[in-house]
Amino acid sequence: MRFTRAELEAYRGHRVDDLIGPNLKLLFVGINPGLWTAAVATHFAHPTNRFYPALALAGITEHEVDRVAGMTAADRAQLTARGVGITNLVPLATARASELSRAELQEGGERLLRFVAEHRPRVVAIAGVTANREAFGIRGAVLGRQPETLDSAQRWSGAALWVVPNPSGLNAHETVETLAAAYAAPAAEAGIIVQPDV
């Protein structure tokens, strides 16, 4: 499947529905949908995005979702049956996340806190440390499991918070293998996979 630039631009500002099932254990949070994501109605769907290859390698999914064509009903059922959900800080599609303002990211952070309070995942994994810093004003935030305090437990409605690497092809520091390792840790805490003892 291919789109022209003009075809993709027609999806600017579109929303992509959240992927949420009744037994939510692990909620992945993207920054905002890209234009390809909006075109195929599938989160993390750009051809260069490594989210679904990393999920499959980590054992979070049984097979790799065809991100280029978009999710099938069976793909969605597989994820929700395993307790995996996907949402975004900002729901509106842009060509690049860098087009978002700090105010939009901060508003998205407040939206995410309400979303977590409503859906009660065990673990929240935000994909992108820079977006996390902007959305929540935590300048010192780093990748990995975030410190748990009484304030953070209340803020996140009891969910454990992880910041994981952004799987975008623009993030040249990561590979499918390093992303899989980063995503496996919160998935193990959520009870979706069992990590071998190291």
Image (cartoon, rainbow, N blue to C red):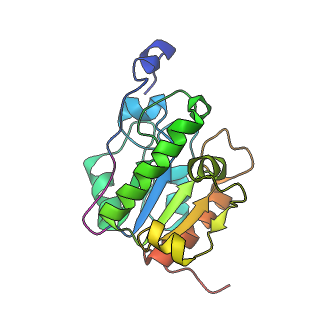
Q: Is residue 141 above or below residue 31?
A: below
Which residue lies at the image location 61% right of the left edge and 59% below the top edge? Answer: 164
**Residue 196 placement, left or right of 18:** right
Of residues 4 and 92, the one drawn nearer to the viewer in this rendering: 92
Q: Nearer the viewer, residue 164 or 80?
A: 164
| Region rendered in magenta | 18-23
Quadrant of res 140: bottom right
Residue 194 against residue 96 in the figure, above or below:
below
Q: Main secondary structure of the magenta part?
A: loop
- Name the residue at 51% across, 37% down: 104
Q: Picture quarter containing residue 92? A: top left
For image coordinates 40% across by 17% down, the residue present is: 10
Farthest top residue?
A: 6
Q: Residue at x 45, y 53 (%)?
A: 64
- Whole-percent x, y for residue 87 in the image: 41, 50
Q: Is residue 87 magenta?
A: no
Give how far across and how far down residue 4 sits, in percent. 48, 16
Quick check: can you spot residue 89?
no
